[in-house]
Amino acid sequence: MQGFGDRLRERARLLGISDAEVARRVGLGERRYAHYVADTREPDLATLVKISRTLDVTPNELLGVADVREEPEERERLVSELLSVIRSLSDEGLRIAIKQSAVLMDFHRTDSVTE
């Protein structure tokens, strides 16, 4: 059975980012985040939400509760396809994609709050 730390590690791997980068994006020290990945400590709720947003998953997914979104295989295929596109971009194209992605995520969060 996969634990919380395993799910953190796997999700970061799928996104192509290191544990250190996840920690930086969340605003945590690498050592503190390493405790979560090693399953020696658990984050508080606010930190769990920040981590889940950074990894673009729900807190329930990180906790091992069933995902109500797409089937895992379909989601993994979509993430792989997106990573392939991202890797082919120039530096400038990547900067633009990052900005567009941030706007899309903000829109998605705002849209899901109004539902």
Image (spheres, rainbow, N blue to C red):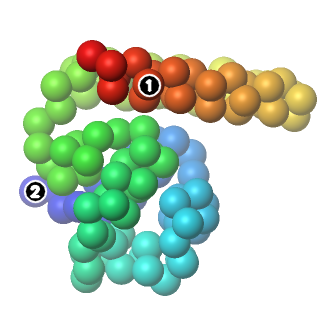
Task: Pinpoint residue 50: horizontal percent, then vertical percent.
Answer: 42, 54
Residue at the image position 29 percent from the left and 70 percent from the top: 43
Task: Pinpoint residue 23: horizontal percent, then vertical percent.
Answer: 53, 66
Query: In the figure, is residue 57 to the left or right of 23?
Result: left
Is residue 77 something that shows in the picture? no
Q: Secondary structure at mark 2?
A: loop
Q: Which residue is mark 2?
A: 1
Question: In this picture, is 57 found above or below 33?
Answer: above
Residue at the image position 34 percent from the left and 52 percent from the top: 49
Residue at the image position 18 percent from the left and 53 percent from the top: 63
Mark 1 is surrounded, within 10 Å at the Cα level, by few (under 14), some (14 to 19) or many (20 or more) other residues, namely: few
Quarter in which the C terminus is drawn: top left
Residue at the far front: name it.
Answer: 114
Mark 2 is surrounded, within 10 Å at the Cα level, by few (under 14), some (14 to 19) or many (20 or more) other residues, namely: few
Is residue 60 something that shows in the picture? yes
Q: Secondary structure at mark 1?
A: helix
Q: Which residue is mark 1?
A: 110
Query: In the figure, is residue 80 to the left or right of 5?
Result: right
The three-letter code of the residue at mark 1 reads Thr
Which comes before the other along the chain, label 1 or label 2?
A: 2
Question: In this picture, is 14 found above or below 67?
Answer: below
Task: Give the label, 1 or 2, closer to the camera.
Answer: 1
Q: CA distance from mark 1 to mark 2?
A: 34 Å
Which disc is residue 32 wearing?
A: none
Residue at the image position 29 percent from the left and 40 percent from the top: 58
Task: Pinpoint residue 45: horizontal percent, then vertical percent.
Answer: 26, 61
Quarter in which the N terminus is drawn: bottom left
The three-letter code of the residue at mark 2 reads Met
Task: Pinpoint residue 98: horizontal percent, then vertical percent.
Answer: 70, 32
Question: In this picture, is 37 found above or below 7?
Answer: below
Query: In the figure, is residue 61 to the left or right of 18?
Result: left
Question: In this picture, is 45 found above or below 97?
Answer: below
